[in-house]
Image (spheres, rainbow, N blue to C red):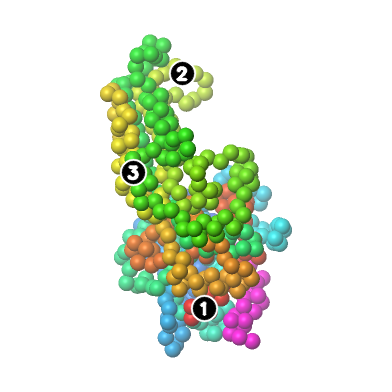
Amino acid sequence: MSQTDQILAALDADRDAAVARLVEWLRIPSISAQPDHAGDCVRAAEWVRDQLLGLGFEASLRQTPKHPVVVAHHPGPATGAKRHLLYYGHYDVQPPDPLELWTSPPFEPVLVDGPNGQRVVARGAVDDKGQTLMWIDALRAWQKVAGGPPCAITAVIEGEEEIGSPNLAPFMEANAAELKADVAIISDTGMWDIDTPALSTRLRGMCFVQLDIKAASRDLHSGMYGGSALNPNNLITKILGELHDANGRVQLPGFYDGVPELSPELRAQWQALGFSEHDFLGAIGLSVPVGEKDRGALERLWARPTADINGIWGGYTGAGSKTVIPSEAHAKITFRLVPGQHHEKVFEAFKQFVNARLPADATATFQGGGASPGIEVPADSDFVKAAQAALADEYGRPAAMIGCGGSIPVVSSMKDVLGLDTVLMGFGLEDDQVHSPNEKFDLRCFHQGARSHARLLAKLG
């Protein structure tokens, strides 16, 4: 039996214990957004630190202005490591509210039957305690069979991902020399389906803007002033209503400058996935797609920029009627960006777009924040190829090379601060109900994820 087969056999034999460890970690309500759970965040960090200490790592908690970061190091084989891998995960979780929609208490994990076998239901099951524990279990099997991993390993497990990782980039900047590695590996994304593994090679970035429009010096009676006084609510809706043309294209000046076209090869790969936009929208009660009419569904979701109004308010919004012309109106807008776009230019283009449409008696102010670039991971890198091979060995089919419509800010930080590309090898499923009540993780994905990470280490050792 080869060493890799021995390691996989060790993982298979450890399945029940692995689930028990996951359940133990999930019981800790490490909600980073709520100050009352600061102590629980420390407990969750200590728990994972102790797991790594037990695997021969040098591991410690590092303080930040909010929640601690777990940093651990293993030098790899005594003969010297060819590769140095940085594994990232996060131990913090989203608030579980609304509690009444959970079928079981969110921090009392339960195992239930599903269409793919057993699943564990709890807050943090897949995002990201389960997916972090997968690669720790792979390291555990390597330690049991081979005495340690075949590569030098650095682990960074933070406690603020669910609140935007405000202290991670400064922490990485302050400790860049210690965190030096060849590549970052993250499991906080998804598979294509239960039978088809995936590598995410594209992430959209983001540019956030709050727009505030002011007109009269006070709110006005709509009977006395209506028909004469400028209404900021009317104005802001008119301006934002012009963000898209009839074909779904965003109308900011220069918005598409630098946006690359898909290669024919990648377009063909995505078409071969057989994605049904009808089913995708039907699952959320919709039936008619929007966006750029001349683009395919996955291209619009993964490789094209967008503009969306996330919130809009002004004047009276309480029960009943109040016949007022408000003096101010407000909106929050986000632009999802792709590689080739720059959030600073998009922010300035939006200001230009709005100011060009302001009448004389209106003023506009703009607040920015939450900006991150679009990311594309080189699909032909040795590390991506090794991940493709590991997944193909485990699943018996090629990994889908997919995009992600959302942003993962840590991937930008890995690149900008540490100069590292990231391999995004995730094992979540579309129905995991991430951030929603009854979050779950299929144990089949949990176990095959650990096996895939063990195989990846063998490829890179």
Q: Is residue 365 above or below residue 135?
A: above
Find residue 254 and name its label. Answer: 3
Q: Compare marks 1 and 2 and give the one earlier in the sequence.
A: 2
Residue furthest out toward the front: 264
Disc 1 designates what residue? 459
Tell me where residue 9 sits by quadrant. Answer: bottom right
Q: Residues within 10 Å of mark 1 (few under 14, many from 20)?
A: some
Q: Choose between 17 and 291: the one closer to the eye.
A: 291
Mark 1: which secondary structure? helix
Q: Which residues are magenta?
A: 1-24
Q: Amino acid at mark 3?
A: Gly
Q: CA distance from mark 1 to mark 3?
A: 44 Å
Q: Amino acid at mark 2?
A: Lys
Q: Give whichever of discs 3 and 2 has the lower sequence position.
A: 3
Left or right side of 449 for 168: left
Q: Residue at x 37, y 57 (%)?
A: 167
Where disc 3 sits, the SS reads loop
Density class for disc 2 (Cα within 10 Å; few <14, some 14-19, many ≥20) is few
| Residue, disc 2 | 322
Q: Residue furthest left?
A: 360
**Image quarter (top left, top right, bottom left or bottom right) of the N terminus:** bottom right
> Is residue 432 in view from this perspective?
no
358 or 259: nearer the viewer: 259
